[in-house]
Image (cartoon, coloured by chain):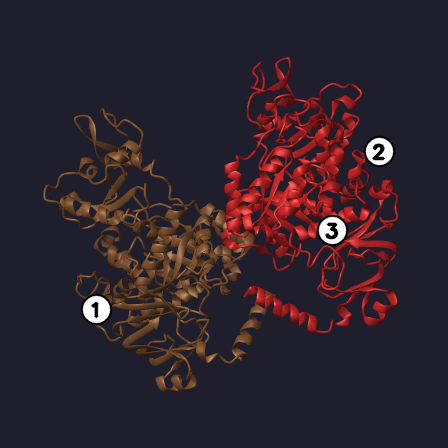
Chain colours: A brown, B red
Amino acid sequence: MRRLALAFVFALALSLPAVAAEVTVLTAARIHTGEPGAAPVEAMAWDGEGRILATGGVRELLARYPGAERIDAAGRTVIPGLIDAHAHLMGLGYALMRADLAGADSKAEILARLKAFEAELPKGAWLLGRGWDQNRWPDKAFPTAADLDAAFPERPVWLERVDGHAGWGNSAALRAAGRDFSGDWQVDGGRILRENGQATGVFVDAAMALIEAVIPPPDDAFREEAFERALAESAKYGLTGVHDMGVSLADLALYRRFADSGRLTLRVNAYADGDSHALTALCAFGPLAHPSGRLRMRGVKLYADGALGSRGAALLADYHDEHGHRGLLVTAPEALEAAMRKARDCGVQVATHAIGDRGNRLVLDLYQKLLGERASTDHRWRIEHAQVVAVEDIPRFAALGVLASMQPTHATSDMPWAGDRLGPQRLAGAYAWRRFLDAGVRMPFGSDFPVESVDPRLGLYAAVTRQDLEGRPPGGWLPDQKLGFAEALHGFTAAAAHASFDEQTLGTLAPGKRADFVILDADPFELPATDLPRNAVRSTWVDGRPVYRAP
Amino acid sequence: MRRLALAFVFALALSLPAVAAEVTVLTAARIHTGEPGAAPVEAMAWDGEGRILATGGVRELLARYPGAERIDAAGRTVIPGLIDAHAHLMGLGYALMRADLAGADSKAEILARLKAFEAELPKGAWLLGRGWDQNRWPDKAFPTAADLDAAFPERPVWLERVDGHAGWGNSAALRAAGRDFSGDWQVDGGRILRENGQATGVFVDAAMALIEAVIPPPDDAFREEAFERALAESAKYGLTGVHDMGVSLADLALYRRFADSGRLTLRVNAYADGDSHALTALCAFGPLAHPSGRLRMRGVKLYADGALGSRGAALLADYHDEHGHRGLLVTAPEALEAAMRKARDCGVQVATHAIGDRGNRLVLDLYQKLLGERASTDHRWRIEHAQVVAVEDIPRFAALGVLASMQPTHATSDMPWAGDRLGPQRLAGAYAWRRFLDAGVRMPFGSDFPVESVDPRLGLYAAVTRQDLEGRPPGGWLPDQKLGFAEALHGFTAAAAHASFDEQTLGTLAPGKRADFVILDADPFELPATDLPRNAVRSTWVDGRPVYRAP
C-alpha cells in the first residue's frame, strides 16, 4: 500500500512541470555523471526538491530552464557524491572530541594544542586527547601530571599515547579517580608509574582503566556535538553518504533528531549493532526510512573474526609469523548463525565483518546455508572487509550474490606487515580487488573511519596505486590488483549506492536521482594518481544544496 | 510526504465504485452504530477491504448493493467492536499457558484438569498451573510431590497455590532444580516443607524461587502459542482491539510477525514498556503503524505508584487502615519526569499508571509542567487507573486534556476493602466515573486483564451496576457513580478508539470506518443489567471478517 502510494506521488511529481524559479542549473568544465558509458557533460539541472531534472549541454539546459537559478563552477569538475560504504560516524565524532596530539615535537606544543582545543569544550568536561609520543620530544622521558597542572589546575585531562598503551593524566584526573595511587601496589596487566612512591601521572595498559573508569560517559549534549563534528568532517572531504556499521538504538535516536530538524547533512545508512536491541527494533518496526531521505536502517552488522594486525583474523592455516596460531572467531558460529537467521526472518540485510580466509569461508558457508534458494533473490548480503580470502572462495561471492565491502586504505596501511602474517602464497587472495571484479563480485568501497582517515580521496588513491602517500613501494604492492580510477570511483559511488538498495536514487547523476555531488578543483580522471589526494574539494552538495564549501 | 501519499490513496479508493462482488451486507434485528444520536439500523455494508460503505435499512442497502454477499444475523444485535483500553496480552497468554486449578475440590480433580491441560503442551515443557487451595479438599492437608508423580513421572509440574504464596512441585520438578532439598536448612523468607528430613514438594514464599529459578524462560514457540491463545481468548468475548500496556521490543517483534502473516486477529495498540529500549526505538524509528492496520505503537506506559490492595497506591494522607503509611512511588519523580520529557520530545503519547490521589496529583503536576502550552494541543496523554483522585483534581484532567483510563471491574473487585483503605471521605473521588464524565473528562474503559477477566461484558455490567456478579451490594456501591449502558459502551468503544487516535477509523459503525463489530444474542440496551454478563457473543468481526464464531 505504501509502495503504491509513493508510486502515485512519484507519477504526480513527474507529470507536473517544474516551477522554473525552483530549478537550479549548474555548469562546470566537466560533470562526470557516472552513468555507464556516458561522456562528461557541462550542465546539470535539478528541481527545488533536489531531484535531478536533466544533464547535458550548457545551452540546452539554460534554454530548457530559462528562469533557473544558475551556479557556475567554471573550470572545475563535478563527480557524483562520494559514499563511504563502511565507517563509524560516532567513532569519528568521539575522535574529533579529543585533542589530536599526533606529531607534536615537545610538551610545549602539546600544551598549546590542548589549550586551543579546550576553547571549544563545555565547562567541566574532561579534556581528552590522543597521540603523544615522548620519543619525539627533546628529553624522550615520560611526562608527568605536573606538566599539565599549571595549564589545567581544575579540568581533568587524560591523554592516550600514540599507540593506545599508556595514558597521561593531570592531577585533577587523578583526584577524580577517587583513590590513593601512592605505595607500591600494581594492577594485573598494567603499571602505575611512580616516583618516590607517588604516581607520576602515567598509567600503562591495564592500569589506564583506573582513570578511564571515572571519565563520565558522554551525555546527550556531548554526543550531539560529536555527531555534528563527524557530519561536518565527512562533508569536508566530499562524502554525501555513509554506511554506518553498527549503530545502537540510542545513536539511531540521536541521528533521527538531526534528521527531524534538518541537520543531517549526510545520507546515513545505519546498520544495527549486532544481535542487539537495534536488530530487535528493526524486526518490530520494520525498515527505517526517514521522510527526509537522509536516514535509513534496514541492515545489521555482525562480526565473525578479529583483525589481521593483532593476529585476530581467523585463518585456515597458521599465521606465517606465529606457528600454531590461526586467529580467532569473535562470535561463536552458532550465535552468528542464530543472528543471521533472525535477520533473515525479519527481512534484514546482513553485513558481517570477516577478515581472514577462515572467517570469510565461515560467513560464506553460513550465508549459503541460510539463504538457500533465496541466494538468487535480491538480498545484497555483504561481507565487510573480505581482506584475506581463499582464491577459490572468491567466485562464491558472485554465486551467492554476496557483496565484498572493501576499504582500499586498509591495504596500504597493512602492506608493510601483511606479508609477514600471511606468507607469500596467501597474498594471492589478499585485498584482491581485481580478482573480485573479474569474478563478477560487486565491491562497494569505504574507509572504516576513524580506523583510517575519513578522506575518500585517500581511498581512491590507494585503489589506483596500492602505494602509500610517499609512493612506496614503487609500482605498488601486489600491483596486478590495482584498479583504474573509474573502477575505484564506482566503488565509492554506484557500488556503494547499490549496497544500500539506493541505486534508483543515488550513485550516479541522472534524471530522477538526487542531486548529490562534489565539486573538485581538477578532473580526477585527468590527474596523475599521485595528485589525487591533493585535488581540493571545493564544495559538497546533498539534495542540490551545499553542505560544505571550502573557505 | 507519507501523509500526503496516504491521502492520495484514500481519495482514489473513495472515487472508485465498489466492486459489487466484494461487498458484504449484514442484516440484523438491530445494529447499534454508536454514532451520536443515531437510531439503530438493520443493515450495514462493507467492501472487500473491510471498510464500511453504508449503514441503513435492509431494502435500501440490498438495493444499493444487489450483488453483495449477504449475512443475516436474524434476531440478533450488532454493536461496535469492543476495545479494551488497558490490558496485558502476553500476561493473558502466559496465564492461558498454565492450568487453571481454581475451585478444584479434590486432588483427583486437580489431576484430571492437569491431564486435560497437558494434551496441548509441547513435549518436555514444564506443566505450570495455578489456583489450588487445599482448604477446599476433603483432608485439607498440603499435597505432596508423590500426589503428582504417578500421573507425571517425567514432565516437571509446578503449581502455584491460589494466593501465590506456595508452590507444589512433582519429583521431576524437584530433580530439575538440581540440588538436594533434604536436611533442615531453609531460605530467608521462605520454607521448604519436609517429612523425615525429605522435601514434600511444597515450597512456601521465598523458597518457591528454588524451583522457579530453573523453569526455562519461555522460548519463541511458547511465546507464540501464548500470544495466539490470548488473541483467541480476546475475540471470544467480543474484543476487536486492545491497548496493550507495556510491550517490550521482543514482544512487539512477535506481534509484528503475527501481523505480517495475517494472524493478528485483534487490533493491538501497543505502549512501550517504560523508559526502555522500546521507547528508544519509538524515538529512533518513529510511530509504528503496521500496513495491516492491526498493530500500532505510538505511546509509552510509565508507572507512578503501586496498587491499593497492597497499600502501594500513593495517598496524600495516611491509609485509613494503616496509620503513618501513605503508599509508595514506584518511580522516582525525577526519573518519571525525565521519561515523560523524553517521550514528549519524541512525540510519544504518555500513559502513566497512577492509583492513589498522591500518585494522580504527581502525574497531573508533571503533565502540566511538561506539556505547558502544549496542553491545549491534541496530545491525548493518559492516566491509567485514576482510581482514587482528590475531588478537586478531577477538573484538572479536563483542563489539561488528560484522559482517565479506567477499569470498571477494578471498582467491583476492590469495593469489599477499598473503604477500609481510604475511609469514607476519600471515597468521593474513588472510581468516580460520573464525576469524571460530569467534569468533561474523556474516559476510555478497559479491564487490566489478566488481573481481571478479559470479558468486557463484565466491565459493562460493573459500570452500570457497581455490583458483583451476585448483585451485592444492593443498589450498587457508591451508586451515584453508576453509568448508563450507552455511557459504559462508549468507554469500551468510541472513547477507547479516541484514546489511541483511532476515532477516524474505529469506535463506531459509520461509512469509511472499519467493519469491526460484535454480534450479540440479545440487545444489551434492552436487557436488565443482571443479564449483561450472560448475553452470548455469537461472533466477533474485524475488518469485516469473522475472527470468532460461537460453536
The quarter holding residue B473 reads top right
Query: Left or right: where does residue A62 sit relative to residue B192?
Result: left
Q: Pinpoint the chain carrying mark 1.
A: A
Q: Pinpoint the chain carrying mark 2.
A: B
Q: CA distance from mark 1 to mark 2?
A: 92 Å
The residue identified by callout 3 is B493
Q: CA distance from mark 3 to mark 2?
A: 26 Å
Question: Residue A496: percent from the left, percent from the top?
Answer: 39, 65
Q: Residues within 10 Å of mark 3 (few under 14, many from 20)?
A: many
Question: Residue B308: percent from the left, percent from the top?
Answer: 67, 31
Residues marked 1 and 3, same chain: no
Q: Pinpoint the chain carrying mark 3.
A: B
Quarter of the picture containing the N terminus of chain B is bottom right
Question: Residue B332: percent from the left, percent from the top?
Answer: 52, 34
The residue identified by callout 2 is B470
Residue lying at the far right of the rendered structure: B75
Residue at (78% x, 34% y) in the render: B478
The residue identified by callout 1 is A531
The amino acid at mark 2 is Glu
Q: Residues within 10 Å of mark 1 (few under 14, many from 20)?
A: some
Q: Is residue B387 above or below residue A507?
A: above
Q: Residues within 10 Å of mark 2 (few under 14, many from 20)?
A: few
Dot 3: what SS? Answer: loop
Q: Is residue A126 above or below residue A440?
A: above
Dot 1: what SS? Answer: helix
Residues marked 1 and 2, same chain: no
For marks 3 and 2, the one nearer the N-term is 2
Residue at (35% x, 66% y) in the render: A491
